[in-house]
Image: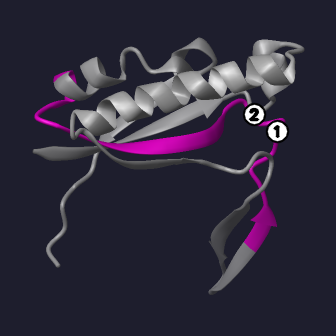
Amino acid sequence: MARFLMVARDAGDMSAIVGDVSPEEIQEILNKYSAWSEKLAKQGRLQGGEKLADGEGRVLAANSGSVRVTDGPHAASKEVIGGFWILTADSYEEAVKLASDCPHLEFGTLEIRQIEEMPA
């Protein structure tokens, strides 16, 4: 069975995505993500996943033999990676089917990429 990385992308500003919401509404959204993840875990299809910290990170690039580090990603970016999951599936078609009811689709997009298994 193949492994797939599923990346959650959004605008990076939750208030722009869902508007002004109460703490109770935020908890309801989080509960949807938890329920979806638990469903896949019970099916043996979820190997892991994490939400990434909002508005914080570093971008590294090679620059004339040294490494240049800048702050990023920036909220002004068109899309920000908000988190990821590792799924197992027999094919892209099955991975898409598993992802099709992910609650993140209400707020952003999902990118699915097969993980190439590398020799140890």
The numbered mark at residue 75 is 1
Look at the picture and state if 24 lies above or below 65: above
Residue at image x 33%, y 40%? 113
Residue at image x 57%, y 43%? 83
How many C-alpha atoms fall within 10 Å of the one at disc 1: few (<14), some, or many (≥20)? some
Query: Pointers 2 and 1 in contact (CB under 8 A)?
Result: yes
The verdict on residue 72 being magenta is: yes
Q: Which residue is outermost to the bottom?
A: 65
| Foreground pick, 21 / 89 | 21
Where does the image place residue 87, in percent across and percent down from the top left?
Answer: 29, 41
**Secondary structure state at the residue bearing disc 2:** loop
Where does the image place residue 91, in percent across and percent down from the top left?
Answer: 14, 31
* Label 2 vs 1, first from the N-terminus: 2
**Secondary structure state at the residue bearing disc 1:** loop
Disc 1 residue type (three-letter): Ala
Structural distance between the alpha carbons of marks 2 and 1: 5 Å
Say how the picture is coloured.
one colour
Q: Is residue 105 left or right of residue 115?
A: right
Question: Which residue is tagged 2?
Answer: 12
The verdict on residue 22 being magenta is: no
Residue at image x 42%, y 43%? 85
The numbered mark at residue 105 is none
Look at the picture and state if 28 lies above or below 51: above
Magenta region, residue range? 69-93
User: Image quadrant of residue 102?
Assistant: top left
